[in-house]
Amino acid sequence: MTDFNDREQNFERKYAHDEELRFKAAMRRNKLLGLWAAEKLGLSGDDATNYAKSVIEADFEEVGDADVIRKVSADFQAKGIEISTHQVEHRLQECMEEARNQIMKELG
């Protein structure tokens, strides 16, 4: 029975670790997207950093990526920047790859 309990605990630890990495990757992805969008919006310095934080916060509005995509797309539209929702979605995917690569590099 001890072997079963050990395996179960190991599985639970791995699951928790994997979920933590997914969360970190998603937050980093949102930051990268926010910095990209900030550049397109003509923001720099603290304004760009604050905008990226607002993109991160937007992700807590609902489950999934729609809230982040909607925020960035609306901000582009408000400034008259012609970047489609599809382009934002594509950039979001690219940012996820970049975020995962950065995190894996940090973990060594």
Image (cartoon, rainbow, N blue to C red):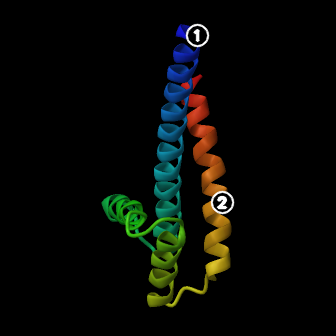
Q: Who is closer to the viewer here, 102 or 41? A: 102
Answer left or right for 54 relative to 84.
left
In the image, residue 24 sits, relative to residue 41, either above or below, namely: above
Task: Classify 10 Å Cα crowding around label 1: few (below 14), some (14-19), many (20 and above).
Answer: few
* Residue type indicated by callout 1: Asp
Tell me the mark number nearer the camera, choosing from 1 and 2. Answer: 1
In the image, residue 102 sits, relative to residue 42, either above or below, namely: above
Answer left or right for 48 relative to 28.
left
CA–CA distance in space, label 1 to label 2: 40 Å
Could you tell me which secondary element the residue under label 1 belongs to? helix
For marks 1 and 2 on the same chain, the one whose residue lies earlier in the sequence: 1
In the image, residue 102 sits, relative to residue 14, either above or below, namely: below
Q: Residue 3: percent from the left, percent from the top? A: 58, 10
Could you tell me which secondary element the residue under label 2 belongs to? helix
* Residue type indicated by callout 2: Gln
- Which of the numbered marks, if any, corresponds to residue 3? 1
Q: Residue 66: percent from the left, percent from the top? A: 53, 73
In the image, what residue occupies the spot 49% across and 49% down? 28
Answer left or right for 14 relative to 38.
right
In the image, what residue occupies the spot 63% across and 47% down? 98
In the image, what residue occupies the spot 51% across and 52% down? 26
Residue at the disc numbered 2: 93
| Quadrant placement of the C terminus | top right
In the image, residue 47 sits, relative to residue 97, either above or below, namely: below
Classify residue 4 by image quadrant: top right
Can residue 41 be seen here?
A: no
Task: Classify 10 Å Cα crowding around label 2: few (below 14), some (14-19), many (20 and above).
Answer: some
In the image, what residue occupies the spot 51% across and 29% down? 12
